[in-house]
Amino acid sequence: MSKLAKALLSRPEISALVMLLVVVTGFAVYAPQFISTGNTRVILFAVPELGILALGTGILMIAGEFDLSVGSVFALVPMVIVILMGKLGIDPALAICLGLLVAILVGYLNGWITLTFGIPSFVTTLGMLFIARSIATVLSGGFPPPFPANTPTGLFVADLGLFRSSMLWFLAFIVLLGVMLHRTNLGNWIYATGGQRQAADDMGIDTRRVKLFCFMLCSFLAGFAGMITTFRLRSALPSLGEGLELQAIAANVIGGTALTGGIGSVAGFVIGTFLIRVIDNGLVMARIDANWFRLAIGTLTILAVILNITLRRKARAMRG
Amino acid sequence: MALEEHVQPKESFVRPSADALIRCERIEKWYGSVHALTGVDFHCERNEVVGLVGDNGAGKSTLIKILSGAERHDGGKIFVEGREVRFRSPKDAMALGIETIYQYTAMVPHMSIARNIFIGREPLKWSLGGLGWMDLRKMADHAINSLTNIDLRTRSPDTPVEELSGGQRQAVAIARAMYFKSKVLILDEPTNHLSVKETNKVLDFVAALRDQGITSVFISHNLHHIHPIADRIVAMARGEKIADIRKADITVEQMTAMIV
Ligand SMILES: Nc1ncnc2c1ncn2[C@@H]1O[C@H](COP(=O)(O)OP(=O)(O)OP(=O)(O)O)[C@@H](O)[C@H]1O
Ligand SMILES: [Mg+2]
């Protein structure tokens, strides 16, 4: 019994899951239409876009680094894709590949600058937040570029009833990255690198390469998520994803990821994402002024961290 | 007593045998303008416990970082089992059976004992280009074995290392080296900040390594820790080796006088 209690206490995503259930139940009681099929669709439509983003920022956070530029990459990458297709007439598949390559390149730059000069990734990616946003705005020329009709939006955002095909991509990324993080040696290196870089170095792990990989993965996922949103809106907006980096990081933290690195799980990222999206939507359904959304997320983030730290201390105090 | 009496003449330093496991000649290391090692000879034989002592900044850590592949030397030669080597990373040294345990960074605190033991050397069920699926069952089984070896039977291999005491962490790191059949285990101040009881346990483990045919190099400030278990004592000062002597030939008091 105490073993089970300890196992539960030391898994922060469990407390996030409990919070999610409480919030869902609360909204369901307060605003019954919250759990209608129509509204479930609305929530499930919105989840993958933040979720894919949060997978990237979360894994990077486990590796001990931040990426504040994901919101801007979220706008830049689809801007590049749409311009390549619409203005230059490049084949959609190739345009998508090139756009995602831009994302990977931004991630590589973030990582290379951070690791080569030994500066905090907070600073590098804060700079990149402005740079990437600026480029996206300049590329658009002030107006959203024409959205080509031959874009394969169906592959990414087709309405499948309860959810869009973006949900299938999200699920694929969850499985793929969940396996990578929790079942492969690369995942072990990511945890070791973020948990105690010197120890990982001493055991012969190339922690620079591990971090660089996580930077690139994070940026790639941000670009991918931005592309999905753009295909859903059928318009590449230069202002897309502003402030989204903070929502992604909040989702990670609510899901039990430690800002100091080495702690976190894919399940936590997913639950954190659902919590944010559910609260966002639930406030609307409950006819509460939507401007309370940020207050709710802010409160939740702080509470989640306090709860996690308290629970972890409790768990550590228990023998087992 | 005159100071000279305490200084060991270079001619009487213990010399390496033809069969020495590790032998370094005239190792030099610069950190910018700091000459951390000014041409140090060092060796260890098979099945030997070498105590490495010296004041703060003497160059002990620098020497063993070079031997463990964490730092590169600027001059001199290293031979392992008679063959000259050049380590580019700790992996190279580990591949030749040289394992190092550092006081504070031996383990990743949040990770489980089982995962810590296998960092960088995870057993894989299948792999592609070095990346692959970890054999978690095998990791847990071997972790349980290792914990039994170090009298930590009651701890689950899933316990995060941060829940272990300093001495227990050292013990797990020693068990890790035993599991990977290291030939030489280098321990940099493993008894620092440990209680008397835990210190004695760690000393027992190091002494037991010799019985398993593992050579160890043991760094400490405390001669009382080194003297009981070492076969040979090497003292350093200001980037130089100032003594290399069989334990039987010296008392703790003489040793103390020599290095301070
Ligand atoms: N990374 C580094 N950069 C610059 N100087 C260094 C570095 N590491 C060590 N030194 C210098 O090299 C010299 C030897 O240091 P080292 O750490 O090897 O000493 P030590 O014998 O291990 O000392 P202690 O007993 O305090 O651990 C010292 O003068 C130290 O300041
Ligand atoms: Mg030292």
Image (cartoon, rainbow, N blue to C red):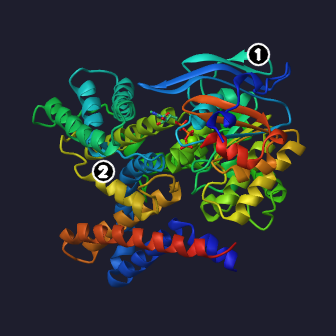
> Residue A96: horizontal and vertical position, in percent?
36, 30
Which label sits on residue B83? 1
Q: Is residue B199 above or below residue A231?
A: below
- For the N terminus of chain B, the image quarter is top right
Mark 1: which secondary structure?
strand
Report the Cα–Cα distance between label 1 and label 2: 54 Å
Q: Is residue A38 above or below residue A178?
A: below
Q: Is residue B107 above or below residue A128?
A: below
Q: Are marks 1 and 2 on the same chain?
A: no
Mark 2: which secondary structure?
helix
Disc 2 crowd rating (10 Å Cα; few below 14, some 14-19, many 20+) is: many
Residue at 53% x, 48% y: name it. A196
As rendered, which of A223 and A230 lies closer to the eye? A223
- For the C terminus of chain B, the image quarter is top right
> Residue B109: horizontal and vertical position, in percent?
58, 56
Residue at 41% x, 53% y: name it. A51
Relative side of B102 to A262, left or right: right
Q: Amino acid at mark 2?
A: Glu
> Residue A178: horizontal and vertical position, in percent?
56, 49
Relative side of B66 to A267, left or right: right
Residue A205 in view? no
Residue at the bottom extreme of this rendering: A29
Q: Which residue is mark 2?
A: A245
Relative side of A149 to A222, left or right: left
Res. A140 image quadrant: top left
Res. A131 image quadrant: top left
In this rendering, the count of numbered labels is 2
Distance from mark 2 CB to nearest ligand 1 atom below 8 Å? no
As rendered, which of B235 and A107 lies closer to the eye? B235
As rendered, which of B7 and A316 lies closer to the eye? B7
Q: Amino acid at mark 1?
A: Arg
Residue at the left extreme of this rendering: A142
